Amino acid sequence: MKVEAARRIRGIADTPGDKSISHRALLISALAEGTSEISGHSHGEDVVRTKIIMQQLGATITGDSTLTVRGTRKGLSPSDGTLYCGNSGTTMRLLMGLLGGIAGEHLLDGDSSLRQRPMDRVATPLALMGVATYGQGIEQTAPLRICTPGKLEAINYSVPVPSAQVKSALLFAALHAEGVTTISESVRTRTNTEDMLAIAGVEISISNSTKGRSISLTPSRPASHRWAVPQDPSQAAFFLIAGVIHPDAEITVRDVYAAQERTGFLNVLQRMGAAIDVERHGDVFSATSRSSSLTGTTISSSEVPSVDEVPILTVAAAAAAGTTTFLDMAELRIKESNRFQGSIELARSLGATVDVDGDSFTVTGTGSSQNFQLITGGEAGDHRMTMATAIAGWCGQGAEIQHSDSVLSSFPGFFQLLSSLTE
Ligand code: S3P
């Protein structure tokens, strides 16, 4: 697919419902007895995978723009078929935990990208709770067979990697443990699972300290609820950054989920000199970004936990004057693709210089997106690398996008939105 360089960009960028919240709304509603509703959710393939798997496990789900989810009185039960998670790491990891409460044997699989991602980070603590996972090799990659005894042991576990997916998997498993489970993390990752389980009536206590956060959960069945999903900040980031780096642009996003673990990229951009007006209303924000001259900064991974925004921040760094250093980015290597390598290659192909030092890298920018090169890129099985490449071409000198289908996993209308904002 060809993305032409835009001469002028204006408009409102409505992005999909938050992916993290959409997955969790489906899981919690399927676990609950009674009828739940979910509106504003993501229609990307990742969330569709979660929906189909919840149906395979016994939930009844109908509707499209609003989903109606009916859990069963006796709870979920094993499926005869394989639970196919597609490209979605969140589906597979959260499911591994949720299956801890469904006695029996479960088969899980994913696409070629997901089959390369480590599942031992979830399987190891789940084994302490009594769940046996049989995967491939030392990293326990998919396909996976999971054997669940029914009742699990409560644990007190400190998650060794900064990962909301691991934390969430253990909290879902803890719903079925005998006793209170406590999970600690040293980097404060997104809180959707603990927040949403608490809204669904589960007894959760959270304590934040200088050392991070710990969450204790007392087992119970979540109650049904009406979930309204706000827009996804990690998707809004692509458009806010386009608005900043393009020389004649103004882009507005609205009703975007505003949790601090997800909006670190806004602070980074403001430090770089970006003209972004942000208005917060409760749990959501609206923002307008305008053409700006950026200067380099230093970004540590804990400022953007889960590092989802790093590929597009690398594009901002390539448009900035001076150097931007990305510190401690090891987790980038094990996302849907090796985004550490991919982000560096993208910045270099745009004309920036990149120096690598272990898990960190420094981008010396070109000073303006108008100095970018025409690029060819995009990544099979990695929506965020593909969207970052497309935005760089749209704001710079154009791009030839390979694997444009990869955006379907999180943002089916992405290329249409680019066209509609181009004047
Ligand atoms: C997610 C957690 C993050 C993030 C992913 C969604 C979640 O992964 O990259 O896009 O919904 O919990 P990690 O838990 O591996 O950091």
Image: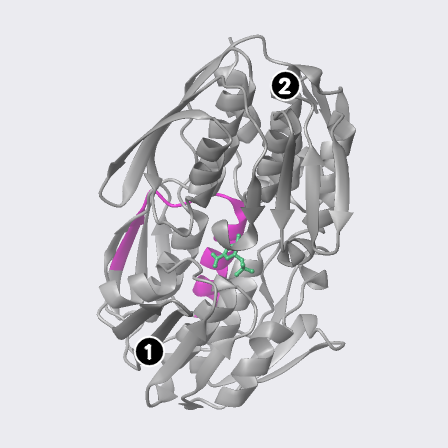
Callout 1 amino acid = Ser
Residue 107 image point, x, y percent: 61, 74
Q: Residue at x 44, y 68 (%)?
A: 168
- Can see residue 102? no
Whole-number angstrom distance, CA of label 1 to CA of label 2: 48 Å
The tag on residue 216 is 1
State left or right for residue 197 relative to residue 271: left
Which of the 4 quarters of the picture holds residue 93?
bottom right
Magenta span has 409? no
Q: Which residue is mark 2?
A: 368
Callout 2: few (<14), some (14-19), or many (20+) C-alpha neighbours within 10 Å? many
Residue 48 colored magenta?
Answer: yes
Label at residue 37: none
- Is disc 1 placed on a helix, strand or loop? strand
Counting residues from the start of the chain, the first of labels 1 and 2 encountered is 1
- Neighbor class of circle 1 (other Cα within 10 Å; few <14, some 14-19, many 20+) is many
Q: Is mark 1 within 8 Å of ligand 1?
A: no
Q: For mark 2, give the secondary structure.
A: loop
Residue type at mark 2: give it.
Ser
Q: Residue at x 66, y 14 (%)?
A: 370
Q: Position of residue 15 (x, y in %)?
A: 43, 34
Q: Is residue 148 left or right of residue 259?
A: right
Per the rendered image, the range of residues in magenta is 36-57
Q: Quadrant of the N terminus?
A: top right
Observer-side mark, 1 or 2, equals 2
Q: Is residue 3 left or right of residue 73?
A: right
As drawn, is 182 to the left or to the right of 115? Answer: left
